[in-house]
Amino acid sequence: MSSNKKVIKSNIISGGIVLGNTRIIMPGDTKVPEIAIPVSKIAGEYLALDKAIEETIVELRELRDSAAKKMGSPVAKIFDAQIMIASDTEFIKRVKEKIKSEKRNAGYIYNKFINETVSPLKRSNDAYMRQTAVDIEAVSNRILSHLSGFDKCDLKFPPNTILIGKHFTPGEILGFRQRKAIGFLVSEGGSNSHMALISRGLMLPVLLTKDIHLHISDNSKIILDGLKGEIIVNPTDADWSEYQKIKKRQGSASIKRIKKLVPIPPQTVDGKIIEVGANLTLPGQVDEILADKKFPVGLYRTEFMYLTAGGFPSEQEQYEYYFAIAERYKNSSVTLRSFDLGYDKLADSDSWGHEDNPALGWRGIRPMLEMTDIFKTQISAMLRASTYKNIKIMLPMISDITELEKAKRMIQQVKFKLKKEQIPFDENIDIGIMIEVPSAALTVDLLASKVDFISIGTNDLTQYTLAADRMNNKVINLYSAFHPAVLALIALTVKACKKHKIPVSVCGEVAGDLSALPLFIGMGVDMLSMNPGKIFDLCRLVKKIDSVMAMHLTESVLSSNKTEDVITKLQNYKIELEKKTIAKRK
């Protein structure tokens, strides 16, 4: 290790790996000089303000159209909201009145009004209000930039630059990407902010660390590892070389290589088919490649529609979006998960209220079973969009049979209503659940008898089984999906699914872990659904595994007493597999 190398643990906002040099953009709060103006220049200030607003609206419309093309209409609505903010005639009228009464420059008065507006929003407990404050500031900064002639997005920097800032607006993310920025390090924001949604849609890695600009200098050579949640500052030559190899196997380059994969789905050496699916949050360019190769979508997260709109979308809006997804993947299948909202996405929201222990509170299916109108509206939209007969509905975080029965009753009620109204839908649509908590895994035999499929969400199942928050650095060493207790619950779930002859998938992060692949094949998992960037390597590895040998490995792994023993056995198997592959080539 080099003497000045350091590793900084960070929260993952958007995944991926990039290598480059840093550029710090930390202008602080916008400061506009106060200038006294004579009455004769007031009309000129009005014109300057109107021109700045008009230029801003033109820019936002261009960004909206670009976002719609790359990521679909739900994401484009972020910019629709900003256009409405910029076009607020009542607000502009008040600004002009103040310019006239105080005889001060337009920039100063406009900025003063903005600060008065966003200050209470920033202090709000409601996540949507705080996001609104960010959107208002994003618009005002554009308008003030046009008034002053300085635009942050016009800053020049070389290719392979990783930008460091307090936070970046959706427009800045799009603008900086066009200028060849490859990643972002921020000190504010969240995994469900508009910045995060746009970054994921564009496959740009973003990591969050408090006061990050104090820990990394301008023009530092760094590696941003958005898979592990690490920033490697001043990496060694060996680090750099190794991560360049890893990067080639990840992200967009890996996704493009999916086009070359045959056959799909991949088969083991002895001919066992292993379904490989994608976990998706936003529409994007990857859809075309996955759909063309007939990959299924094992998990489509629908809650981003709430997060982009700041509220629950109408049934028609949802229907149009779900139908577009179903149409795109008409030659495969799409598993739509019902709204999975809770503490990790709506922390301190007024809609949710304060919870002393939110991780064990009102989240997953629980709020939907109480907000029945919202749940039924979503189910109705999903059913209406199911006419291609390729949609499946998945219910998150089911913890017992009572929750499942209540949800299924409501689904039946929606079906009855659609039939009565003679609206077509897939009457045999598959309904499945996610196994994410130990209580569900321990009663899975009963649950499996009531559903059409099961998906194992290993991220939460691991967290709840081990009582270890994976984002808490103090207990990160305890968090492992390879813990014998977690594997026992996964094996129990797979066994129950086999008994009831329903398909079972794994859709947590470990689904894309190459070392875990033979273990899941040996268990009898039907599908592995993962980040699209991991699909290529996993499909290649499937073809090298003998399912019978994998079963022997699984027996050995499940008899292990320690996490370390599990990892060692899986790594040794992978090494032996690589040796056999090299020997065959010779």
Image (spheres, rainbow, N blue to C red):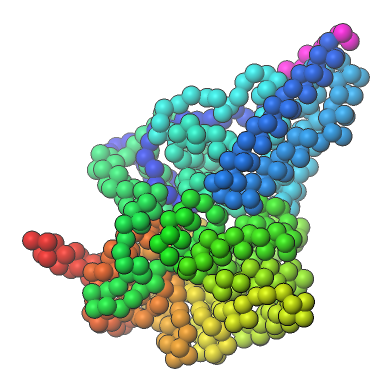
Question: Which residue is at a point 62% across and 35% down the rendered structure image?
Answer: 62
Q: In this view, does 515 lie above or below 163?
A: below
Where is residue 229 shown, x and y percent of the image? 44, 51
Range of magenta residues: 33-40
Q: Looking at this view, is 62 or 34 the one in front? A: 62
Q: Looking at this view, is 476 or 130 the one in front? A: 130
Q: Is residue 127 above or below residue 378?
A: above
| Quadrant where the N terminus is found in the figure | top left
Where is residue 441 shown, x and y percent of the image? 50, 82
Side (left or right) of 407 relative to 250: right
| Quadrant where the C terminus is found in the figure | bottom left
Quadrant housing residue 158: top left
Question: Which residue is at a point 48% across and 24% down the rendered structure image?
Answer: 156
Side (left or right) of 538 relative to 340: left
Question: Which residue is at a point 77% across and 81% down the rendered structure image?
Answer: 420
The prevailing secondary structure element of the residues shown in magenta is: loop
Q: Does the magenta stretch include residue 149?
A: no
Where is residue 338 shown, x and y percent of the image? 63, 69
The answer to whether residue 375 of the structure is visible from this angle is: no
Q: Looking at this view, is 34 or 547 the one in front? A: 547
Quadrant housing residue 136: top right
The answer to whether residue 376 of the structure is visible from this angle is: yes
Q: In this view, does 431 lie above or below 512?
A: below
Question: Which residue is at a point 54% across and 54% down the rendered structure image?
Answer: 283
